[in-house]
Amino acid sequence: MLIEPTWVGLSSSEIVTIVKAGRKPRYFYKFVPVGNAVRKLEIWKQQDCEIFYLSSRTLPNEVDDIRNVLVKYRFPAGTFLYRKYGEAYKDIAERIIPDILIEDDYASDGGVADMTYPHLNPEAKKKIISIIIPEFSGIDQLPDNIIDLANYSK
């Protein structure tokens, strides 16, 4: 849901190509929302959704940068999570068991190996609806209505 400002206007596949070529983001405090991510989350929040933000950042200063970007752009209130030492994304998802897990396909680095849902235990998979979006594409294309969102991947 966040990208470098120099990537605004580029397609998801163009950004993936840039990252695969070695141009990894470094200045997380400069990140901006992808598309209308803030508005989409506001719409879901108005439908009484509890929002969890799971950052890929693990270093304390980078975690703070991302948290500050969420505040700066007025993302709806939610629980901010990140992996601690030795934790995988699946560990966090299995702890909180969200109704819906929206994650990108990690096309630029790792693919399925770095995703959350494929690595969940079978019991957690039964409880969580998985929605996979192309990396860097944002969430604008997802339904506004939370019931439609829950059926989106089916």
Image (cartoon, rainbow, N blue to C red):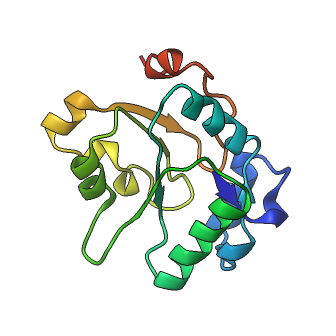
**Residue occupying image coordinates x 70% and y 54%:** 74
Q: Which corner quadrant of the image does residue 124 belong to?
A: top left
**Residue occupying image coordinates x 44% and y 21%:** 150
- Can residue 23 be seen by looking at this rendering? no
Percent across and percent down for residue 125 are 23, 34
From what the image shows, is residue 6 above or below residue 42?
Answer: below
Percent across and percent down for residue 143 are 61, 22
Q: Which corner quadrant of the image does residue 54 belong to?
A: bottom left
**Residue occupying image coordinates x 57% and y 67%:** 67
- Can residue 47 be seen by looking at this rendering? yes
**Residue occupying image coordinates x 45% and y 52%:** 111
For the C terminus, the image quarter is top left
From what the image shows, is residue 52 above or below residue 99?
Answer: below
Horizontally, residue 4 falls left or right of residue 42, namely right
Q: Relative to the observer, which residue lies in front, 80 or 83?
A: 80
Horizontally, residue 34 falls left or right of residue 153, namely right
Horizontally, residue 94 falls left or right of residue 136, namely left
From what the image shows, is residue 129 above or below residue 36?
Answer: above
Percent across and percent down for residue 78 are 49, 50
Q: How many badges with numbers are in the image?
A: 0
Percent across and percent down for residue 102 are 47, 39
Q: Which corner quadrant of the image does residue 138 belong to?
A: top right
Q: Relative to the observer, which residue lies in front, 148 or 134?
A: 148
